[in-house]
Image: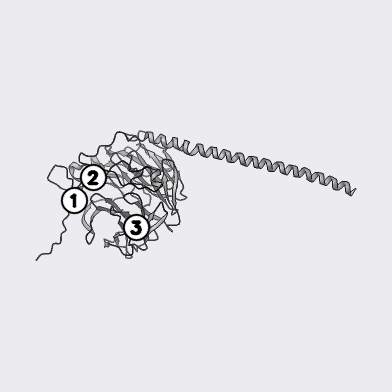
Amino acid sequence: MFRRVVRASKFRHVFGQALKNDQCYDDIRVSRVTWDSSFCAVNPKFVAIIIEASGGGAFLVLPLNKSGRIDKAYPTVCGHTGPVLDIDWCPHNDQVIASGSEDCTVMVWQIPENGLVTGLSEPVVVLEGHSKRVGIITWHPTARNVLLSAGCDNLIIIWNVGTGEAMIQLEDMHPDVIFSACWNRNGSLICTACKDKTIRVIDPRKEEIVGEKEKAHEGARPMRAIFLSDGNVFTTGFSRMSERQLALWNPQAMDEAISVHEMDTSNGVLLPFYDPDTNVVYLCGKGDSSIRYFEITDEAPFVHYLNTFTTKEPQRGMGYMPKRGLDVNKCEIARFYKLHERKCEPIIMTVPRKSDLFQDDLYPDTAGPDCAIEAEDWFEGKNGEPILISLKNGYVPGKNRDLKVVKKNILDNKASLIATPTTTKNEAKLDEVLKEIKSLKDLVSSQEKRIIQLEEQMSKIAI
């Protein structure tokens, strides 16, 4: 009797395909900074790539259709004074991107509707609060204008971008450099991987650690941790023997991993990209020339190897397209933007199907661009699940989502909400202090006069 070895899965036959040269983005000087971020961020409108820049930090923002050779004089986003380490597109507005840099600042940028015509050096808002370089940037998945940044000062700050304020500072939780930070599906928790080899699950609004696992991976090289849609945590790291590992954890019981898999002995950090709609995790190793993918299920061994897509050249970084940017007519379930030394190459992952009809099993309703709650509601303790949209007729960007109005609001709000009350408060305080100084001066001068009078009386008595 034959034992059935091959597990049935509709993603077993997913195949990857690199696009032809004329659909790549060529002649790009990809950043050489030694930092383990993906160096690339994409959305349904633009691809953004961190590049080498003299005298500061810069990144390119290209409309998706702007393939081919990119002119050396092509305008860049260039407001940072140090190299850019991480970038992330806002999930609720395809023209807003945040960047973190070695200059210790976070900047939020408004990209024009059709891309850059001239260099952009004026951000919408500069967020200052870190004392060392900022290596991790990630937007809240469901609340408008909430942004998380993590720096080499071992500090996590959660910002309200709409007012430019640092609302939450998670200090003294990480004794060493933070390697990764990730929100859960509704943004109520974050999970982090730290150089002290500990995975932490944190409730940011209560400012408390709700689960942690020391020595999640015993190797010294960087780990990564991401949330899955069921609330479990998926990690990549290294064993004591420097083998690459992946593991699955339940945050409520982190003593033992649900599942641990050894992979190979390469030393490139594994960047995990997760699709909550299909429960597939794609692992792209820095310096690897392959993308491995795994399906996460409820049955042992829980993490099932599907396949590997291999190319000739190693990858410097990788961008991952949100689901709403994919071509549903071609059964495309993932698209990567692979960075080489001098170019960016799109790679599409498709499930072969004979029918031309919409494949609803491949495309359940997915997170759309609308935010579920406002920043203020989230900071007050409310949560909002992602607002889902159907991709049956493809994704059509909304007409009313121009951020220029929001941009004015951000600046106006900063002027009216912050400057005016603070200014009037400060003026009132200044008046009080000046009055007190004047009264003290009056007191001192009257005392001095009295001392002179007494001295005169003493001299008269002495005579």
The residue that mark 2 highlights is: 365
- How far from the left and from the top, in percent, is residue 179? 37, 55
Q: Indicate yes or no whether the magenta region holds residue 292.
A: no
Q: Is residue 289 visible?
A: no
**Residue marked by disc 3:** 223
Does the segment drawn in magenta span residue 17?
yes
Q: Is residue 360 visible?
A: yes
Looking at the image, residue 232 sits to the left or right of residue 306; the answer is right
Quarter of the image holding residue 175? bottom left
Total marks shown come to: 3
Residue pointed to by mark 1: 14
For marks 2 and 3 on the same chain, the one whose residue lies earlier in the sequence: 3
Residue at 36 percent across and 41 percent down: it is 97
Q: What amino acid type should be assigned to the residue bearing mark 2?
A: Asp
- Of the pair 347 and 24, the residue shown nearer to us: 347
Can you say which quadrant of the picture contains the N terminus? bottom left
Q: Are marks 2 and 3 in contact (CB under 8 Å)?
A: no
Q: Amino acid at mark 1?
A: Val
Residues shaded magenta: 6-18
Q: Nearer the viewer, residue 329 or 252?
A: 252
* In the image: residue 430, left or right of residue 357: right
Label pair 1/2, CB-CB below 8 angstroms: no
SS class of the residue under badge 2? loop
The correct choice, above or below, for 323 with respect to 404 in the image is below
Q: Residues within 10 Å of mark 1 (few under 14, many from 20)?
A: many
Residue at x 38% of width, y 46% of height: 378
